[in-house]
Amino acid sequence: MAGLRFDLRDAPDGAAALRAEVREFLAEHAQNFTPEIRARSWMGFDRDFTRAVGAKGWIGMCWPREFGGAERSFLERNIVLEEMLAAGAPVGAHWIGDRQSGPLILRLGTEDQKRHFLPRIASGEYAFCIGLSEPDSGSDLASLRTKAEKVDGGWKLNGRKIWTTFGHLCDWMIALVRTSPAPEGGARHIGLSQVLVDLHAPGVSIRPIRDLVGEKGFNEITFDDVMLPEDALVGQEGAGWAQATSELAFERSGPDRYLSSHPLLEAAMTTLKQDGAAAPALGRQVARLWALRNMSVAVAGMLEDGQDPVRQAALVKDLGNDFEQALPNVVRDLIATEDMPEDMRRMHAYLTQIVPTFSLRGGTREIMRGIIARELGLR
Amino acid sequence: MASEIATELAEQADRALTDAADVAVLRSLEAGAWPATTWDAMAALGLNGALVSEDAGGVGLGFSDVAPLLEVLGRHAAPVPLAESIYGNALLAAAGISPPEGTLSFGARNGAIPWGRHAGHVALLDGARIALYPAAALAWEEASNIGHEPRDRARIIGAPIAEAVLPNSWGAEAGLLCTALMRSAQIAGAMQAALALAVDHANTRKQFGRPIGRFQAVQQQLAVFAAETSAASVAAAAAARAVDRRGLAAAAFEIGCAKITVGEAATRGAAIAHQVFAAMGITEEHQLHHFTRRLWSWREEGGSEAFWAKRIGQEAQALSGALWPFITAREEEIIP
């Protein structure tokens, strides 16, 4: 069960100063954070804000300077992420690029890909989305059917991706697609590759799908004979499955897996500060938050050490999702919605509707627990 | 992260307990016997003074170093007061009292004293006042927790060997905080043991023609158990680290958060363990209950989840909406 071991990590040198700098920056922008924006957390999309974050050097901050990075540590980056989430800042326009597309390109991209994409992600110019799910392929991702065929001068892409967050607002997608047929009777994850898709290219059509809150958050994206250049391939042809799954350690490891409801917890603390009867329930939330943070920082430390904490990340995501998902209901047991101050009530209303997504996005609760069960030797 | 020596000590204790504290020993303890051979094996490790400085004749380890050892004690449901001896000696040393040889326990003067009837010496606490009594100076009203561990009440019939007042950095709640720290790490260890038993059972017990661990419903439950077990271990370690950094009294927030976390984890984990073992796990013959009854007991000792939740909640409310800055600053501020 070594994959379920966590070693505590101490804060990096200069942590308090960096945190103070981020807080100061956020205070300057906070007047723009409406309750709905704060409640959206990393699902808030604001290009101007992202460019301002980029100008501070806080996107791609662990990457080499020659590619637009700041050569800071994962633990320092974690501080920036924590502060953004705690404040409910609209980080959606750079979150995916910073969290996984950029690191993937840095790790496996060609020199040209690194030179082109990384500085543009780091400045906030390019927004990335992830192309994994398809209409008939969700948790069973290896069954996907979108296909890139080798043709003269590149690849021809056909198929459909769905549930793509911010697809209609982004510039680029890294899609997992089939580039050669699965071997007869063999493993289906052979023959998959990751490709860079320019979402403004001819043949790409994007249909926003309204979510239950009434917003256009995710999309269905259709590829109809989309021509991709040869260098659209990221990493190795046919190795897309292994690449995409190791990327998941980055996707699942961060504080975005337990802090998505945090602004509501802070609002509850303020609103209920005189309410003695609320103390025990609030105390339990504080304890869970504290424990999750220690676990999450431990995972950041493993990334810092170059480990691949895919199981620990799944475990923290599962516990963290339970915590952030339960919060709106915990809070409404302490104060009736009609008695909440206006801002808090609006955050609460939004989160009540959207928290079911927390244990779906980035891999479902059932998939996370399956990963843990495998580590226990049960599968 | 635990130091190398701490890992080594934990491994030594693990080996010693594997030999000296099997299920038969646990059963005889519950029948009222004192497991002298188990204590002798533990005493041979020379760990009683683990938290006492080398100047004062101890091993000079920190609370973080000792946490893995306490987890090992929990993993074996160790039927001897080694945790109490280690922490009791730390309390005495902090008050300037020379640690005694042999078994030691401690607790609030008017409270239940773990292992009281078996202890060679007992440190009784009344706020920050601490007094060391030899066994001959105490009479016991015997009682147990639901784990069948001795939890006795002391009547003082003789004179203390020494009396002193703990420094402010240990404070008037030192006994409560030390107990919470010990039980937090022991809960993490007992959960590891119960989880390993449950996983092993799920892989061997067959129903419908296959091991029950092949069923997703069982896998998902055990995954939750594993996640809670990891959370308990991290919480216990983080509380110990806070004590090393800030001192005992100033780490009450982390100790309380840890005790809530491990208590909730114990409740969830014990329930899942029994669900996986079904009727077999309910029998006296099976070893599972040695762990689950202790998990349920240890939740209560050193403050229950409810006790700490109220207190941590009140502390958080007093922050007036600055919870996040408070939590982060505790990790990052420069501590003199």
Image: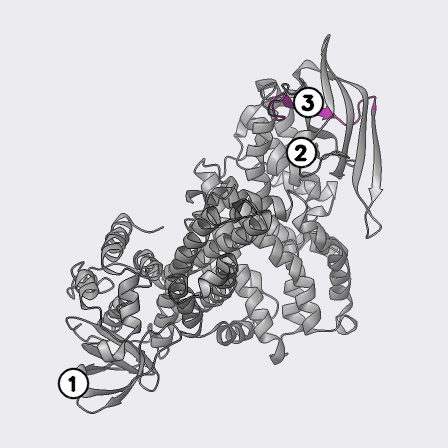
The mark found on residue A178 in the picture is 3
Q: Return the disc, 2 or 3, that comes first in the chain's sequence.
A: 2
Mark 3 on the same chain as mark 1:
no
Residue tagged 2? A141
Mark 2–mark 1 Cα distance, whole angstroms, equals 70 Å
Q: Quadrant of the N terminus of chain A?
A: top left
| Three-letter code, disc 2 | Leu
Q: Residue at x 22, y 65 (%)?
A: B52
Q: Quadrant of residue B124?
A: bottom left
Q: Chain of mark 3?
A: A
Q: Residue at x 61, y 56 (%)?
A: A322
Q: Which residues are magenta?
A: A186-203
Which is the main secondary structure of the residues drawn in magenta?
loop
For label 2, the crowd category at 10 Å Cα-Cα, with few meaning under 14, some 14 to 19 and many 20 or more, is some
SS state under label 1 = helix
Q: Front-most of A183 and B57?
A: A183
Mark 2 on the same chain as mark 1:
no
The mark found on residue A59 in the picture is none
Q: Tell whether A172 sits left or right of A315.
A: right
